[in-house]
Image: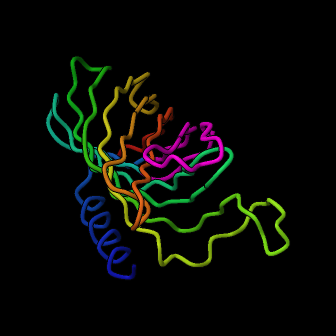
Amino acid sequence: MKRFLLLTIILFSANYISAQTLGLKTGLTLSNFSGVNNLNNPESKVGILFGVTSEYGEESIKFNPELIFNQKGSKNDIQLNSMDLNLNGKFYFNDEISFNFGPSVGYIISGKNYSSDNSGQEQWNIIEDWESWNRINYSVAFGFSYKLNDLVSFEYKYALGISSLLKDENLKNSSSNLSVNYIFQY
């Protein structure tokens, strides 16, 4: 975990030193699990996302790294808080609209699951034993963004989980993200 965080800090520091733009991102995420049949009722969960973003490159093709706090999971089973490092490419059709595509690596910070306690009562329990979890997870994301002006842009992204969150079972998280970016240009 310490290596992952150190690598993330180094990557973002190097990017921000040479970045043309630096900004803040916030939005909503609608996520759910796939792959496991024994979930109670896997309804989609609405969560929040926020973090920092940068963008640099040529006129029509730009690199867009992001460090984002993201709430993932399902409404009735498992809810996770994750830090995601997104490495997107932006391919602009014109000055305003772009197609975005790229990999993402996430680290699960905390979580809770809906399960029975010692007395047999169903309740939300904080996950403390992470032995059966893969805390580092991978996904691929694609979507579109629209620049309202030089400072504000809107983005829709679909992130498809490609690695399992559990070591012994196939549990993947996928999400739709709708966000707004505010860019500081310097």
| Residue 29 belongs to magenta span | yes
Q: Nearer the viewer, residue 4 or 37?
A: 37
Does residue 139 appear to the left or right of 183 in the view shown? Answer: left
Judging from the image, the colouring scheme is rainbow
Determine the main secondary structure of the stretch shown in magenta.
Answer: strand
Q: Nearer the viewer, residue 92 or 164?
A: 164
Residue 36 vs 114, above or below: the answer is above
Q: What residue is at 64 percent from the left and 41 percent from the top?
A: 41
What is the x, y in percent for residue 153? 43, 29
Q: Which residues are magenta?
A: 24-52
Give the farthest residue toward the bottom.
2
Residue 115 vs 24, above or below: the answer is below
Q: What residue is at 24 percent from the left and 65 percent from the top?
A: 14
Residue 137 vs 132, above or below: the answer is above
Q: What residue is at 53 percent from the left and 68 percent from the top?
A: 109
Does residue 59 appear to the left or right of 74 in the view shown? Answer: left
Does residue 135 appear to the left or right of 32 in the view shown? Answer: left
What is the x, y in percent for residue 85? 36, 57
> How many numbered discs?
0
- Rendering quarter of residue 1: bottom left
What is the x, y in percent for residue 45? 62, 41
Q: What residue is at 38 percent from the left and 66 percent from the top?
A: 136
- Rendering quarter of residue 164: bottom left
Q: Nearer the viewer, residue 32 or 117?
A: 117
What is the x, y in percent for residue 122? 80, 59
| Residue 118 belongs to magenta span | no
